[in-house]
Image: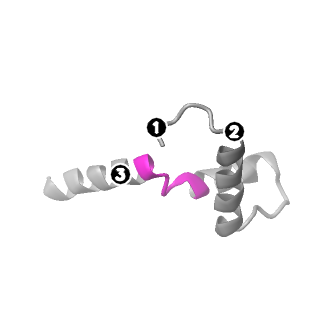
């Protein structure tokens, strides 16, 4: 029971912090761009941060 709760808390924190975003992006990329190599994780985060900086929208920080 404790392991299940800790696993759920760990999942929630990773989702909140964006730790699983690259993995989700790769799955999406593979589905929509078959046969094409996705960017590396470093390139993904660099592009994402650049996009957020260029289009800040509404966010707390």
Please indicate whether residue 56 sits to the left or right of residue 59 in the image: right
Give the vertical position of 58 relative to 16 (above or below): above
Q: Main secondary structure of the magenta part?
A: helix
Res. 58 image quadrant: top right
Foreground residue, 46 or 2?
Answer: 46
Q: Which residue is farthest top?
A: 58
Q: Which residue is farthest right?
A: 35
**Mark 1 or 3: the one toward you:** 1
- Disc with the residue nearer the chain's start (1 vs 2): 2
Please indicate whether residue 30 sits to the left or right of residue 56 in the image: right
Foreground residue, 61 or 10?
Answer: 61
Residue at image position (14%, 53%) is 1
Give the vertical position of 41 relative to 50 (above or below): below
Give the residue at mark 1: 60
Return the x and y of residue 38 as percentages of the image width and height.
76, 61
Q: Which residues are magenta?
A: 15-22
Return the x and y of residue 39 as percentages of the image width and height.
75, 63
Residue at image position (80%, 64%) is 37
Give the residue at mark 2: 55
Res. 10 image quadrant: bottom left
Q: Is label 2 in a helix, a strand or a loop?
A: loop
Numbered label attached to residue 13: 3
Q: Is label 3 in a helix, a strand or a loop?
A: helix
Residue at image position (66%, 47%) is 53
> CA gap, disc 3 to disc 2?
25 Å
Please indicate whether residue 5 sits to the left or right of residue 13 in the image: left
Q: Is label 1 in a helix, a strand or a loop?
A: loop
**How packed is label 2: few (under 14 Cα within 10 Å), some, or many (20 or more)?**
few
Residue 16 magenta-highlighted: yes
Return the x and y of residue 4 as percentages of the image width and height.
22, 53
């Amino acid at each position: 029971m404790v392991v299940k709760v800790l696993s759920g808390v760990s999942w929630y924190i990773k989702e909140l912090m964006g730790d699983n975003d690259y993995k989700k992006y790769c799955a999406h990329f593979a589905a929509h761009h078959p046969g094409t190599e996705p960017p590396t994780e470093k390139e993904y985060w660099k592009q994402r941060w650049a996009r957020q900086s260029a289009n800040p929208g509404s966010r707390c920080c």
